[in-house]
Image (cartoon, grey):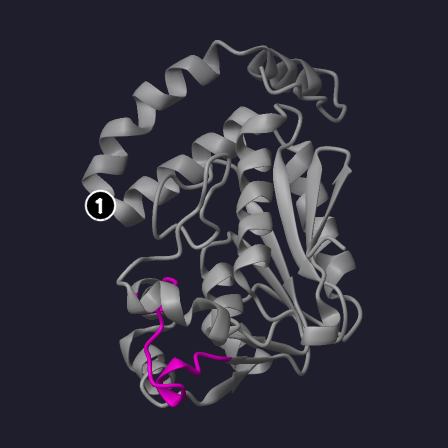
Amino acid sequence: MALVNLEKKGHILLIGLNRPDKMNAMNRAMYHEIAAAYYQLEHDDDDLRVGLMYAEGAHFTSGLQLDDWAEVFAKGKGIEPGEGELDPFHITGDGLGKPVVFAAQGICFTCGVEMMLNTDVRVAAKGTRFAQLEVKRGIFACGGATIRLQREIGWGNAQRYLLTGDEWTAEQAYDWGLIQELVEPGQQFSAALEIAEKIASAAPLGVQGSLRSSKIAVSEGQEAAKQRLFPDLQPVMASEDVKEGIQSFLERRDAVFKGR
C-alpha cells in the first residue's frame, strides 16, 4: 500500500499522507514518497500548477517515527532526498517553484509543522493540535522549525514552544497568521481545494514569479528581490498569457491561461 496517495485533479496535484493506522507517523519510506511527489509537482508535468498536501484519517501526523530515523541522525546526516526527489522541508537541495496549499486536522506534530512551514497557504480544522515535541524526546527540531517558526509567529512565541515542547491550538495558529483559514472539522480539505483551484486558475507564470520574488525577499533580502523584479518580469510580459489577460479584460470574461 502506498504511504502517500497521489492524484491529479486538473492542474492540482493532491498529495495525501496515507498511514492512518499509525497516525501518519513519517518513516523514511513515507518521506521519500512525499519527496518524489514534490519532484513530480516541480518537474514531471508542466500542466501541474499547485500542490495540495493533506492527510487521510483523523490526524495529519503524530510526527517522525524516531526509531526509523535515529541511526540517520546519529551519523550526522540530514533528511536527504534521493534522485528524482525534492526535500519537502527544503533543508537540502532545491526548493519548489510552485505553490503548495496545506490542510491539517487532528494532531499535527513535529515534521507535520515543519512541512507546513515550507508551504504557502495553510488551512486547519478547529481543534487541530500543533507541537514541536523534539525537546521532550531528547533532540531538537531539525526540519526547519528553528529556522522558520520565529519568522512566522515571532521570536518569543516560537521559543515558547520550541524550548518546552508544549502544544498550541489551531485558534492560536490562526491568530498568529500561521494558518490562513480556520474551518469546521471535516471541511479542511474542501477549503484548501478551493484555494488551490483559485491559484490553479491564475496565470502560472505570474503565480510562479510572485512566489519566486517572495522567496528571494525572505532568503536573500529585500534589496536582492528588488533587483530581480523587472528582469524576471520581462520574459513574462512576452508570454501568451499576458496577451490573454489583456484580451480577457477587454472582453470582460475570465482568462484561460496556458502557462506560456
Q: Is residue 86 above or below residue 61?
A: above
Chief SS of the magenta region: loop
Tell me where residue 174 appears, x and y as whole percent: 55, 73
Confirm whether the magenta stretch covers residue 141: yes
What range of the chain is rendered magenta? 131-146
Q: Nearer the viewer, residue 79 or 211?
A: 79
Of the 4 image quadrants, the one containing the N terminus is bottom right
Q: Is residue 142 above or below residue 233?
A: below
Task: Give the residue pinned by disc 1.
Answer: 221
Q: Name the amino acid type tagged 1.
A: Gly
For the point 50% across and 53% down, the residue is: 119
For the point 30% across and 69% down, the residue is: 74
Residue 64 is left or right of residue 23, and the answer is left
Q: Nearer the viewer, residue 250 or 75?
A: 75
For the point 38% across and 84% down, the residue is: 161
Tell me where residue 203 appears, x and y as whole percent: 60, 27
Residue 78 is left or right of residue 187, and the answer is left
For the point 45% across and 61% down, the residue is: 117
Looking at the rendered structure, the secondary structure element under dot 1 is loop
* Image quadrant assignment for residue 187: bottom right
Tell me where residue 121 appears, x and y as whole percent: 56, 55
Confirm whether the magenta stretch covers residue 98: no
